[in-house]
Every structure is written in structure tokens, then in C-alpha cells.
Amino acid sequence: MRESPYPMIPVETAITIILQHVRPLSPVTVGFMEALGLVLAEDVYASEAMPPFAASAVDGYAVIAADTSPMRRIIGAQPAGSMGMLAVTPGNAVHVMTGAPIPAGADAVVMVEHASEENGYVRLHVQPAVGDNIRPAGQDIAVGQLVLSRGTLLGAAEIGLLATVGRTRVNVHPRPRVAVLPTGDELVDPKDQPKPGQIRDANRYSLLSAVREAGGQPLDWGRVPDRAEAVQEALESAVRQADAVLTSGGVSMGELDLVKPYLAKRGTVHFGRVRARPGKPVTFATVEGVPVFAMPGFPVSALVSFEVYVRPALLKMAGHTYVHRPRQRVILEHTIRHEPDRTEFQRAIVTRRADGHYTARTTGYQGSGRLLSMVGANALLVLPAEQETFPAGSELEAWLIAPVREEETPANS
């Protein structure tokens, strides 16, 4: 039996090694509408106040609060979008729209709901106080204020804020370009009917999709046959053109497992086995500074390994500060047994009960080739090594990979 030269290391040690060897990608400057979903690589300050002038917060009448006249003569209207020349004096009012500048002399606005017009006059049904319904200049944003910090993930609100302060170009960390290379002579396209001994290629498409879900830019490098020169050529071109490389298959100890020997010859293999199930032969290497993640060939092994090792690395490369999935203590709904030689990640469904507790049940048979065990799962249930049986009611840690389900309340409750 061939013996692996690589020691088996704990899962958390493997994650630590990976994160020590990847760095955020160098910032690029893009138009702010291209920055959605990217991480800001600079601090953004406001160059002007918002609002830049005192503005009405409602449709109403601009008045002098100290004036006690119940009736005010309407001397004109002030719409939003222009700065008028009207000035309010005692006994007068100006009809203002939401967002309109406050006319000179006015220090309060009475809502239209609290007033009624009568023959060119307005009757106030409330006595206003100074500042009522007025947004003072700089209320939202002051000149020179830090509005977005380096490391902020840019979502819809952040894009709107960039527009507010006039920052139409910003420095961001780009999406990591990840070359995906499944290996194996047994693989055929999904549209093809497999011949005896062949299977349809699932890893290529699940890993391309996983990269996109993680915020990366997937690069489809195509399938690589089990020939040393083909593996070398594909990996060399991927390392030259991508920010990271992701392979599947070819990392065990068989005669045609060619990825790991190539990485050992061409770069630095930082680890070649992890004390985990699935995914024991997961390998992490760097070739000319480019991280290479070599996943097992079984579809579930590849996807679980991506979640555990690759996703955090891609997030760090994209500039994210928080790169790990949320972790939640859960209560088992049923007994689970596993081989206690390694930490196991079982696919599970976590539910938040009405009493606030979180429960978990697995998705059935947990074989490494059964992609159905990933479908519908919202968590990876962590079964520690050294313990074989976890009875119903046991508390375990779950890594949440999708939203938690809420317990349905009976309609007649």
C-alpha cells in the first residue's frame, strides 16, 4: 500500500494555514455602479453637507414660530429643486414642498394636515415650535464626515450613499478570478450519455457556481484528462492567468492522481491531508504566490471542502474582514453515529424553534458521492473526532451555509 508523505492535520489548522498564505487583492478603481458587492479599499469622506441647506421635511407652510396669528397670508410657494427669493415675515406664510429650501425668515413648518387654506390665507390648527419639520443643513452628513470605511461591503444603501456624496469612482478590491479545473478521463458533459465506466461531470459546474456564490469570478478551464502533460499544461496556464486555482480529482494516492505530485514539484505544498470527512486528501499549495486548492473528486467532498477551506480564502482575497460562516450551537433531533477517526461535516437542516432553541437533523445518507445530501441543507453539522455516537438531544456546533428555517406555528395556536 502506498503511504502518503503528508501528515493529517486538524481542520482549524488547515484553515489557519490557508488564511496565512492569501492576501487581499490589490485595489482597482471602478465606477460606483460597478462596485455593488465589492469591498471598499479606501475611506470615503463627505466634501459637502447633506442636506446642503435647511429643507422642509414635509409638505406644509413655512412660518415664524413666535408669531401667534391664527391666520397667515400666503405670499407664494417654494417648490423643491430651486432656491426662491421669498422671505417670511410676521403674519405671512410660504407654501413649501417636501425637500424645498426653507424661505428666509421662517423657522418652522406646519404640515398641510394641520392647516387649511381660506381665500389666500392659511389657518394653522397647531402652534408650531422652532425647528418643527425642518431638516437643518448638515443634519444627515457633515462636511468632512467619514461616511464609508475601508473594508465596507458595498450594498444598495452604500451605493446610494456614494451617489449622495458625489463619489462616482471608488477604490475597491476586485473579485478573485478563480480557474476551475476538474480532472478525470471518466468525466463527460452533462448533455452526453455516459458510456460504461463514465459519469457526467458535476464538479465542474457545482464549483463554478460555488465560486460565483462566494463573490469570485469563475473561469471555466475545462476538463483535464488524466495525463501528466495535460495536468501540467492546464495548471501552468491557470496559474499565469488566475488569482487562484481550484481543481477536483487527482489528489489521492492512485497511479493517475497527478495533481498533488505536480504541485509538490512546481510549488510549495502547505498541507496534503486533513483529518476530516469528507475531504481527507484536500491539498493546499502555492505556485509562484498563486493559491491552489486541490479538492477530492467526489462531488460532496469537493463542495464541503470548498465551504470549509476555499470560501474563506476567496472572501479574504476580495477584501472581506469577516470570512467565516456563522456558527450556531444546535440540538440533535435524532441520534447520529460516525467513524470517530476524523472530524466529520454532515449536511443538515437547522430550524429555529418558537422557544428560541435551534435544532438539527441530517439530510439522510451522507455518502461523499450523494449530492442530494447537499440539496436543501442549510448547515454543516460538525461531529468531533474521538466520539462515535451523538444521541438525540446532544448539543453540537453547526456552520450555517444558508438561512435558518423558522418553526412553523400551527394555524389554530
Image (cartoon, rainbow, N blue to C red):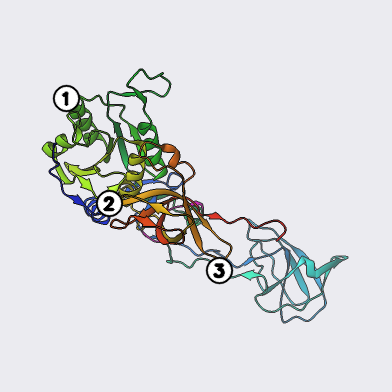
Query: Which mark identifies residue 89?
Result: none
Give the quarter of the image for residue 110. bottom right
x, y percent for residue 151 = 36, 57
Q: CA distance from mark 2 to mark 1?
A: 34 Å
The residue carrying mark 3 is 137
Circles 3 and 1 in contact, beta carbons < 8 Å? no
Q: Which residue is mark 2?
A: 342
Tell which circle, 3 or 1, labels the residue nearer the N-terminal end. 3
- Circle 3 crowding by C-alpha within 10 Å: few under 14, some 14–19, many from 20: some
Give whichever of 202, 117 is nearer the camera. Answer: 202
Amino acid under disc 1: Glu
193, 49: nearer the viewer: 193
Q: Is residue 372 left or right of residue 176?
A: right
Q: Say what secondary structure mark 1 lies in.
A: helix
Which residue type does callout 2 highlight?
A: Arg
Instruction: Mark 2 or mark 1: name the one nearer the start of the chain.
Output: 1
Give the amino acid at mark 3.
Ala
Residue at 41% in and 53% down: 336
- Region rendered in magenta: 149-156
Instruction: Specify the label residue 229 is tagged with.
Output: 1
The label nearer to you, 3 versus 1, is 1
Q: Secondary structure at mark 3?
A: loop
